[in-house]
Image (cartoon, grey):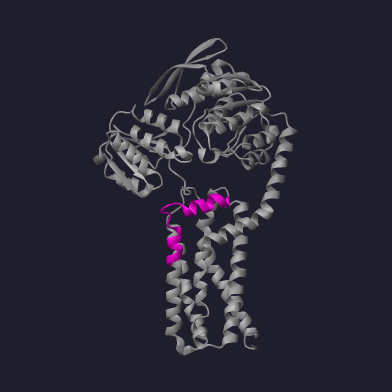
Amino acid sequence: MGIFISVPKTIECVLAAVIFTALFAPCFYKLLGILQSCGYSGKKFFGWARKKNNLVFTRHSLLTLLLLMSSAGISFLFAFVNEWAAIIGCSSYIIFLIVYTWADNRVALKTPVVATPRFKRLYIILIFIIAVLAYLAIVLLNFADAVWGNRFFNLLRYVPLSLFPLLMIPLAAFANLCAKIYEVPHNKKYVKAAREKLKANPVKVVGITGSYGKTSTKQILAQILSKKFRVLSTPRSHNTPLGLALAINDNDLNDFDIFVAEMGARHLGDIEELCQICPPDYSIISGICPQHLESFGTIENVVKAKSEILAYTKEEAVIAEDCFELFASSPCRVSPADCVSNILCGCEGTSFDLTLGGKTESVKTKLLGRHCAQNIALAAAVAFKLGMSLEEIKCAVEELDFIEHRLQLIKSGEVNILDDGYNSNVKGAAAALEVLKNFKGRKICVTPGLVELGILEEEENRALGGKLTGLDFVILVGDTLIAPVKEGYLSNGGDAQKLKVVPSLNAAQNELKGILAAGDTVLFLNDLPDIY
């Protein structure tokens, strides 16, 4: 017992815990990136881990088995050095944990880890938890060795550390839970500060929500308004309370005339919470479709959630023409976005007539598809209400640039690439395929299917498969949703010889190298993030 509590033994335990933590913690980096993509939601994180064909548990089990067998084998091999045999056996941890980290990080996440302050705090908490657990485990193992005095146990006393990889997912989730003790009140203060800051400033607010088209409409509106006003908009697809607060707190609102805020929702009450942060002077509902049914449950709940913005709109709401009737009985003044007509779509852009204030102008934009004209109609109607003239709006529309990953046309040599990677809704998919069919030459679609459609997921993916018939090649990616897409394709007369199933986007790109020729057009329809 005295040997156990000696200074050398204490130093050994501390050093072993520090070294093990330094080796084990990097194995979590990519896992925490997944947790970040899940919005730090433990429920979504465990849902990702449980998904069919997710190999994360298999990889962790394999790592455990390798550590177990190698550390035990090395310890027995060096049994002749007595006390040092168990320590030498730990060398396998150095080898396999470094190799695991290297191999795991060779395949980058589709949504890269963003080392935000929150992510760093979470990582530090996780490292602390690993260090404490490793130290306790090492101390207990050494204590057991001192009490039992068994030579066999002495040799293998550090082998049980090989079981730690099996705890990787629970440890990440527990660290996240601990982090929320600080993060939740901190975020509330941050959001409150944004609300007070916006309340004290005369900047006009335009709120945009809908099942689809929110980000595109936001960026179109911001580009149009910037021709006359100083415009601030929420970055990228930031449409949560923290996303809005980030845009407000990180900018001097005195430098802007208009704040364009994208507002997303997955549950009833989400839009109301966002509107309490920045109640809109004008609002836009960009469209309704069965998106996020996984959390909403029914399309009626989707409509109810999106209508929450109308109760907070001070001036007027502009609503997509095809869903206007759903919101006609509104607590605020509403109008349909019916200012665009005679839409003509081609592979070089879209032309239409734009009518505002009783006057009509013919307009052309490089943006592709009928749906882009409908998004422009929403933005143009609000811009007109905010004081821009038809002529100013027309000029701005004709200068619109492609929106990244949203039916963005990219020329790669003599091949056309339609990057619609951020589209994962039923109507957007139909619009993208309509655009693809406008191009000459061979037409190819690469897709993993559509997500977050709840009970309609199989039905809608089967319907998507039917829409893919007639294309020259179809490449289905992954294993999440491709079964109903494939079934829909083949049952609607699709040619099995033109259909290819690959495990990843990288594999799809390699497949394309052997297919593509000058004049071909490839549509990348929905590049699912890692959590799917």
Residue lying at 57% horizontally and 79% vertically, measured from the top left: 141
Who's the residue at 59% across and 33% down the image? 305
Q: Is residue 257 visible?
A: no
Q: 262 left or right of 528? A: right
The part of the chain drawn in magenta is 41-62
Name which quarter of the figure residue 448 lies in: top left
Q: Quadrant of the N terminus?
A: bottom right
| Along the line of sight, the residue nearer the viewer: 274 or 221 | 274
Compared with residue 89, is residue 492 higher up or lower down, i.e. above or below?
above
Horizontal arrangement in the rendering, residue 517 relative to residue 262 (left or right): left
Q: Give percent across and percent down for residue 240.
A: 61, 40
Q: Toward which corner of the image does residue 259 lie, by quadrant?
A: top right
| 498 versus 385 height, above or below | below
In front here: 182 or 148?
A: 148
| Residue 124 drawn above or below residue 445 | below
User: Residue 213, image x and y in percent?
Assistant: 51, 31
Q: Say which quarter of the image contains residue 147.
A: bottom right
In this view, the residue farthest toward the left is 497
Q: Is residue 300 left or right of residue 241?
A: left
- As for residue 43 lying within the magenta part, the answer is yes
Q: Residue 292 location, x and y as percent?
A: 52, 38
The percent coordinates of residue 455 (x first, y second) are 47, 39
- Most prominent secondary structure in the magenta stretch? helix
Q: Is residue 105 visible?
A: yes
